[in-house]
Image: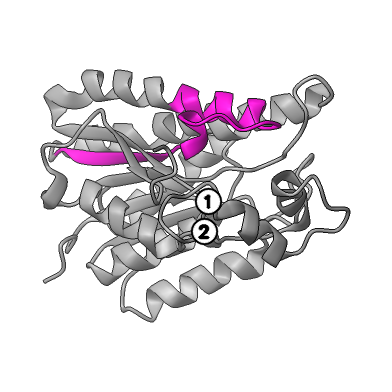
């Protein structure tokens, strides 16, 4: 028996990166999955965003573990679409116990030079999209009457300031108080709400040219090796970027019985980055 046997998890941004890793890790522990991702290019984002093929690969990997998965292409900015996706998933899988509000974007930009669309898209996806995720899904946990867990993907950027990330950091910091307030509101129903704060994670959102330039503005065409050299200075442990499964294992702790009394916390997985 896995630690999540019989449970159902709703995961946003599930097509690749941390979202796919979370889906697979929770499925390994017995959970069935409701998965969504935008699966098209998001405006203002300077790297390729998820595709239908990416989401199909997540489905393949979860089904290979003999778990059920209901996957839908939907943007977290679309509350009606999210609601339909969750409603359909619960109708097929029978319940909802866990929500992982993981979807997010990165668009490095100077605070005084970024355009309005860049700022607004960031807030709409990384902050408002999380509220919409919770609004669409948590009522199903409440209806089940069994309690449950919500984990919101924030960032070390909510704690530690870096230039050219004002919109990203503002959104990620806003998630902290959203989670704390939701934790108070939902505690009587035995629903726990926490944020998780990774340092740099080796996913497509990070391993791209715009991020390399953010870390190495001194170079005209920085490479991954150049990025890693700079990233090593952020983390006190000798690693430039952690793996998605490192975050998935922390998520598993928060959503399982192991973390049954943990709520309203900022759970940091940062290789010593805030020290």
Is 256 left or right of 87, judged from the image as shown? left
Could you say which quadrant of the image residue 178 lies in? top left
Farthest right residue? 220
Mark 2, Cα crowd under 10 Å, few <14 / some 14-19 / many 20+, is many
Is 233 left or right of 272, judged from the image as shown? right
Span of residues in magenta:
147-175
Query: Residue beneath label 1, please?
Result: 200
Mark 1, Cα crowd under 10 Å, few <14 / some 14-19 / many 20+, is many
Does the magenta-highlighted stretch encompass residue 222?
no
Residue at the image point whose x is 12% and y is 42% from the top: 260
In the figure, 160 relative to 23: above or below? above
Q: The N terminus appears in which quarter of the rendering?
A: bottom left
Nearest the viewer among 213 and 82 is 213
Where in the figure is residue 86, as x and y percent of width and height? 42, 45
Residue at the image point whose x is 68% and y is 66% from the top: 225
In the figure, 203 relative to 171: above or below? below
Asked if disc 2 and disc 1 are in contact, CB closer than 8 Å, the reply is: yes
Tag 2's secondary structure?
loop
Residue at the image point whose x is 20% and y is 41% from the top: 148
* Rendered image coloring scheme: one colour
Marks 2 and 1, how far apart in space?
5 Å
Could you say which quadrant of the image residue 181 lies in? top left
Where in the figure is residue 101, as x and y percent of width and height? 43, 41
Q: The C terminus appears in which quarter of the rendering?
A: top left
In this rendering, does residue 148 appear at all? yes
Query: Residue beneath label 2, please?
Result: 241
Is 88 left or right of 55, judged from the image as shown? left
Where in the figure is residue 121, as x and y percent of width and height? 70, 31
Could you say which quadrant of the image residue 224 lies in? bottom right
Tag 1's secondary structure?
loop
Does the magenta-highlighted stretch encompass residue 169?
yes
Nearest the viewer among 270 and 54 is 270
């Amino acid at each position: 028996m896995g630690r999540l046997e019989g449970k159902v998890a709703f995961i946003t941004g599930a097509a690749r990166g941390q979202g796919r890793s979370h889906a697979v890790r929770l499925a390994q522990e017995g959970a069935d999955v409701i998965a969504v991702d935008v699966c098209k290019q998001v405006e203002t984002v300077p790297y390729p965003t998820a595709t239908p093929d990416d989401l199909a690969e997540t489905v393949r990997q979860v089904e290979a573990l003999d778990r059920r998965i209901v996957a839908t292409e939907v943007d977290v900015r679309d509350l009606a679409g999210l609601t339909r996706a969750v409603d359909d998933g619960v109708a097929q899988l029978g319940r909802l116990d866990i929500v992982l509000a993981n979807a997010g974007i990165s668009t490095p930009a100077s605070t005084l030079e970024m355009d309005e669309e860049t700022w607004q898209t960031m807030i709409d996806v990384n902050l408002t999209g999380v509220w919409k995720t919770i609004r669409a899904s948590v009522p199903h946990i409440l209806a089940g009457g069994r309690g449950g867990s919500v984990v919101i993907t924030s960032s070390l950027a909510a704690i530690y300031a870096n230039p050219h990330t004002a919109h990203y950091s503002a959104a990620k910091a806003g998630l902290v108080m959203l989670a704390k307030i939701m934790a108070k509101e939902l505690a009587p129903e035995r629903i726990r709400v926490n944020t998780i704060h990774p340092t740099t994670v080796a996913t497509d959102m990070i391993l791209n040219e715009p991020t390399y330039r953010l870390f190495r503005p001194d170079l005209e065409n920085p490479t991954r090796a150049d990025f890693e050299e700079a990233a090593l200075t952020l983390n006190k442990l000798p690693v430039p970027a952690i793996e998605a499964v490192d975050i998935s294992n922390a998520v598993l702790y928060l959503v399982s019985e192991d973390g049954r009394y943990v709520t309203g916390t900022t759970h940091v997985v940062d290789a010593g980055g805030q020290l």
